[in-house]
Structures are given as C-alpha cells and as structure tokens.
Image (cartoon, rainbow, N blue to C red):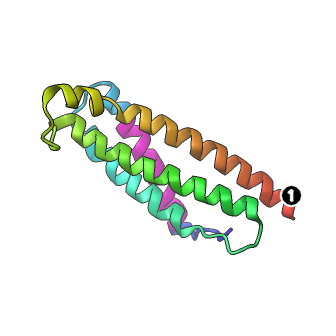
Amino acid sequence: MRQLSKTETILFLLGGLLMVVGAGASMFLQSWASYVFAPGALLFVAMQLRQRYEGNNFTIRRLRHIMIVSDVLFLVAALLMFANQSNFLRLDYLSYIKYVHNNWIVVLLVAAILQLYSSHRIANELEKDR
C-alpha cells in the first residue's frame, strides 16, 4: 500500500474527525451538522483513494474494492444528510419519509462496517505478505 505523506495523513484524520463531529451533531438536531459531515467525508474519501495498492495479491485488491464501495456510501450518506434537511429532491411526503428521512444513518452504518472490515483485513494481509 502506498503510504500517505504527513500532510495527507493530517487531512485524512481531519476528514474522519469532521465526519464524527457532523454525525454526532446531527443527533442533537444541529442544522450545521451536514455542512461539517460532507467536507469531512470528501476529505476522508479523497485521501483514502490516494492510498493505492500496486501489488498482485488478489485478496488485498478485493478488499480495496470493498473499501471504495464504503467510500461511495460515505458520500451517499452526506448527500442524504442534506436531503434530510430540506427535501431538495422534491419528493412527496410519503416518498420522502420512506426513502430519505434519517436513512443516512443506515447508509453510514453500512459504510462504517465495510470500512472497519476491509481496513482490518488489509492490515492482516499486508502483515502476512511480509
């Protein structure tokens, strides 16, 4: 795996921190929560995509694809946070309640579980390769 530079590591950690603060603030119904979560998700995803794997280990390549799926889900969760605030998708009330209202939490949970699984397994596989 390509290691991040010191600046990239700081941006990666800042993105993760902003995501946690934004998700936590939304629990207390803060209107600014999505404006903190979304840039954090963008930073986190951008820095994680900069970590590339150029090796030939099929398992690590598969786990990287799972990690990319979780990155996309983080961005979808950010979009759903904005949609949860204002219904900018212009859905009728029943469709909004069914498809959007607080469903960003489910997407965020799935993304976090995939992220946790893939990062743990990648670390184990890289250690096994050494």
Most foreground residue, 118 or 90: 90
> Which quadrant holds residue 78?
top left
- Tell me which residue sits at (74%, 54%) in the image: 123
Estimate the x, y position of residue 42 in percent, counting from the top left.
Answer: 38, 57
Category of crowding for the residue at label 1, using alpha-carbon neighbours closer than 10 angstroms: few (below 14), some (14–19), many (at least 20) = few
The residue range painted magenta reads 8-23
Q: In screen coordinates, is 91 left or right of 123? A: left
Estimate the x, y position of residue 103 in percent, counting from the top left.
Answer: 35, 32
What's the residue type where badge 1 is placed?
Lys
- Tell me which residue sits at (37%, 43%) in the image: 77
Magenta-drawn stretch contains 35: no
Identify the image quadrant of the N terminus: bottom right
Q: In screen coordinates, is 7 left or right of 83? A: right
- Residue indicated by mark 1: 128
| Magenta stretch: dominant secondary structure | helix
Estimate the x, y position of residue 9 in percent, counting from the top left.
Answer: 54, 62
